[in-house]
Image (cartoon, rainbow, N blue to C red):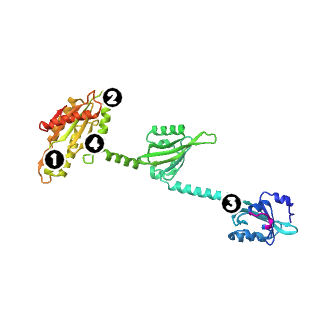
Amino acid sequence: MSLIPESQLFNDILPAAVIIAVEGRFEEANQAALNLLEAQDISELKGRELSDFVHPLDQPRSQARVRREGEDFVNPAAKFRIRTVKGAYRMVLLSSRAFSHEGRDALMVTGLDMTDHEALDAQMRESEHNFRRLFTNMQDVYYRTDVRGMLVQVSPSVEAMLGYSAEELKGEDVRRFYTDDTDSEAYLQRILQHGRVTDFPARMRSKFGRVVDISINSQAIRDDEGKFAGIEGIFRDVSQRLEMEQELKRLATTDALTNIENRRAFLEHADHVFRSAQRYGTVVSMLMLDLDLFKTVNDEHGHIVGDQVLVRFAEQVKRELREIDLFGRLGGEEFCVLLQHTNAEQAAIVAERIRKRIAQLRFFDDDGANFSVTVSIGISANQAEDRQLERLMERADRALYLAKHEGRDQTRSA
């Protein structure tokens, strides 16, 4: 049997250490053990059963270790839930061996408090579990590249977005998936300059050729020396969002009936073109169009037929216009055209073509009756002294009044 160490040496042992009599009762405890068990002194422990301090579910294992017999036998380290004097539980890594204490067989038990370690380990396991669950189920794509731009890690969600499995993409140069090289270069430069990017817009091509609009949020990875070591971040598919935004913009700027610009959109667009023309000394002309006696069409043939007339009228006018020309419905049967790089004489020719085209149209109502409509058009070109679009519109409106006053189905300039 081993001899018990000197009492001072026993008390100086860094791990918590206790001496348990062969029948399982406390004999001695060093200061570290008293601290662990939240005891003021040995009197709170001496003579008490070891089982008083062991969690009920751990007691069978504990009792088996105490009952072991044999010279210098050693119980290997194992974790036990130990109850302190104050009732709190600590996770302790215990090891023990037989030795002789004051001429009697006893057990020296040493322990390391693993409570904080266990809590940290549990937190890390939970954190890892949560990350893996998020990593697997997230709709956005998480990715990480090395310093050369090669993909090191990609979340499984990339397959739903781009058609590639995560394994297919590992080791690939991320830049090859951009549809535009300037996007990838601009993105990289911003990362290098600012360390991160937020909502960076780009486009990627999927495995099957589909172009996907994405928004990227990423940051630079630095090594221990602060040197650039790669990029990590997420990107998401914003194609549907952009389509919705474009559709909302279209609805906000388009006349629902004729599918041309509505009053607000036309005037904003026309004002921009007008100001540019005045600044650079270029010429623009405006046509103010009004369907003649349109109220009669509605009264005699019904509003549904009247709407059909407006739709067909807009379609026919567009046939006489260029891509650069603006065309909008101001309201009711009144329309407006802004012809870019077109003087008054040229505008008059366009207006006359429109007038003749409309006069040749034939319409039919539900009863089979056919009828025609005519249009009156006022023409005005910008002048050097014009400061606002309203001046151009006022002259075109006066010219339209003349066309109406002089018999309709005419074009007039002002």
- Where residue 26 appears, as percent x and y from the top left, is 79, 68
The magenta region covers: 37-43
Q: Looking at the image, which residue sits at the far right?
A: 103
* Number of other residues with Cα within 10 Å of mark 1, as a class: few under 14, some 14 to 19, many 20 or more: some
Type of the residue with mark 2? Arg
Q: Mark 1 vs mark 2: which is more N-terminal?
A: 2
Q: Mark 4 vs mark 3: which is more N-terminal?
A: 3
Q: Which residue is mark 2?
A: 279
* Number of other residues with Cα within 10 Å of mark 4, as a class: few under 14, some 14 to 19, many 20 or more: some
* Number of other residues with Cα within 10 Å of mark 3, as a class: few under 14, some 14 to 19, many 20 or more: some
Q: Are marks 4 and 1 in contact (CB under 8 Å)?
A: no
Q: Nearer the viewer, residue 148 or 321?
A: 321
**What's the CA distance linking mark 4 and mark 2?**
24 Å
* Number of other residues with Cα within 10 Å of mark 2, as a class: few under 14, some 14 to 19, many 20 or more: few
> Tag 1's secondary structure?
helix
Type of the residue with mark 1? Lys
Left or right: residue 404 compared with residue 101: left
Residue 115's disc number: 3
Left or right: residue 221 compared with residue 336: right
Q: Are marks 4 and 3 in contact (CB under 8 Å)?
A: no
Q: In the displayed structure, would residue 149 be above or below residue 395? A: below
Q: Which residue is mark 4?
A: 263
Q: Which residue is mark 1?
A: 295
